[in-house]
Structures are given as C-alpha cells and as structure tokens.
Image (cartoon, rainbow, N blue to C red):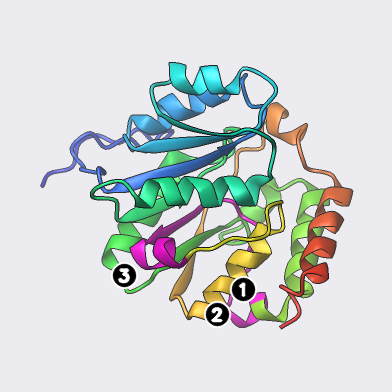
Amino acid sequence: MAEGSTDPRSGDRASVDNSDVWLVVPVYNEASVIADVARQAAQTFPNIVCVDDGSTDDSAAEILAAGVHLVQHPVNLGQGAAIQTGVEYARAQPGSKYFVTFDADGQHRVSDVVAMIDRLRAEPVDIIVGTRFADGRSESVPIVRRIALRTIVFLSPRTRRLGLTDAHNGLRVFNRTVADQLDIIMAGMSHASEFVALIDHHSWRVAEQPVTILYTEYSRAKGQSLINGVNIVADGLLHGRMRR
C-alpha cells in the first residue's frame, strides 16, 4: 500500500490502516488541552479511549466534544488505575491488537507513536518504551526532571538489567500479549516502576525508542518538581518494585 503524505508534527498518514491500534489516555483535570490533544491524535489513530480519572473540571465534556471514547472514574484513583481501566476497555474492543499509553497534556508526539507502532508490527518485540535519553534528546528535558529520572534508573537494578534508560516515560506501545497480562495494582505515578516489574516477570520482549517530549509552558507547570521525582522513587521502593 502506498503511503500518503506525512505531517511531521502529527504523524498523520492517511492511507495507513490503524484500526487495530488503541490509544489509552489517562486524564485528570486537563480540560484546557485534552480536546486538542485527542483531535490531533485521532487524525492518525481513530481509536482513542480517554479515562477521566475523577476530574473536577470539564475534562469529560471536552473528551466527548472531541468525539473519542470516554470512560470515567467517579473519584481520582491515580494514573496507574486510569491506564489499567483504559487498557481493559480497549482490549475488549473487536479487532484491537496494539495499544498505546499516551499523555493528555500534549507532551507526546503522534509521529513518535507512528514510528513505535511500525516497529512493533515489524520486529519480534512485545513492548516498546519511549526514551528521552538517546540521540542527544536529553538536553530538552528540564534539569530537575533529568536528575529525578536518572536517579530512578540508578536505584533500579531491574531497570538497568532490562536495558531501559527512561522507565518513567509515559509513551509506550505494546501488543495483545502485554495487554492481556497487564494487571497494574499501583494506582499512582509509581505504576511506571510496576511496568518494569511486569516486563521482567512475564519475560516480555522489550525495546526502547528515542522520542521527543514537548515541554510546553502548560506541561512544565505540572509535575516537574524534584519532590515529585523523589516521591516516585520512594513509592516504588516502598512497594518493593525496584529492588530486584
């Protein structure tokens, strides 16, 4: 099949059939950006489920306005729980084969998802995790965030053993094997450490993909502090997910 034109910003390729791909987007109080994020992604990936994780703003209405699937948690349960809910919804849909965890705040590029899905279709891997620490891309990461992410890898022998350099990158693509076995129990941000533990436990074939994270003024105002990184590390250690 001949490929259509590609928008370098969105990754849109009109002639490629992505009907077997589902984007799972955890959402908590993202009303100002989620509709635009969902609409742009839907130009390339028509199957998107946004999990409104107990938002207190108009996120749910904005998701519906964008014309994508909406699942709601009545209260805020955390990003890990939202991802688990979204994957369960997506894997129940007819024809679903590939799954993507995708942030709601506009940090992820659809073009990176396209490249990762292409690899997942072609290579003998089960899950591909985005990394900010390849091809010189780490320079775009705020210094405080960079320190926190490097510390997480340093404290996790399992992460290093698997060859992962950016385990807390929220951009991941995976196949049906992973989706069917995924069972996240750590509801908050430390679910990323649990992803690593599950990769190891189930012997999923894993690879990394260099990606660019778009640190907008909006995203920089959310969750970029060192204390947030320390909390992620502490939570993972407390649950014994990063020790082995």
Between the residue at mark 1 and the residue at mark 2, the CA separation in whole angstroms equals 6 Å
- Amino acid on which disc 1 is placed: Ala
Secondary element at image label 1 = helix
Q: Is residue 218 left or right of residue 181?
A: right
Please give the range of residues in magenta: 159-181
Instruction: Compare marks 1 and 3 and give the one earlier in the sequence.
Output: 3
Q: Name the residue that disc number 3 marks.
A: 123
Q: Residue furthest front?
A: 74
- Magenta stretch: includes residue 164: yes
Earlier in the chain: of badge 2 and badge 3, it is 3
**Between residues 238 and 164, which one lies in front from this camera angle?**
238
Q: Which residue is mark 2?
A: 201
Tell me the quarter of the picture where residue 111 sits: top left
- Asked if 237 appears above or below 5 in the picture, the reply is below
Percent coordinates x, y for residue 12 in the rendering:
32, 35
Q: Is residue 212 visible?
A: no
Instruction: State the quadrant of the C terminus.
Output: bottom right
Q: Would you say the residues marked 1 and 2 are in contact, meaning their CB atoms lie under 8 Å apart? A: yes
Spatial CA span between label 1 and label 3? 22 Å
Question: For the residue marked with disc 3, what is the amino acid?
Answer: Glu
The residue tagged 1 is: 197
At 25% across and 43% down in the image, what residue appears?
Answer: 19
Q: Nearer the viewer, mark 1 or mark 3?
A: 1
Q: Nearer the viewer, residue 127 or 132?
A: 127
Q: Where residue 130 appears, x then y in whole percent?
A: 53, 57
> What is the tally of numbered marks visible in this picture?
3
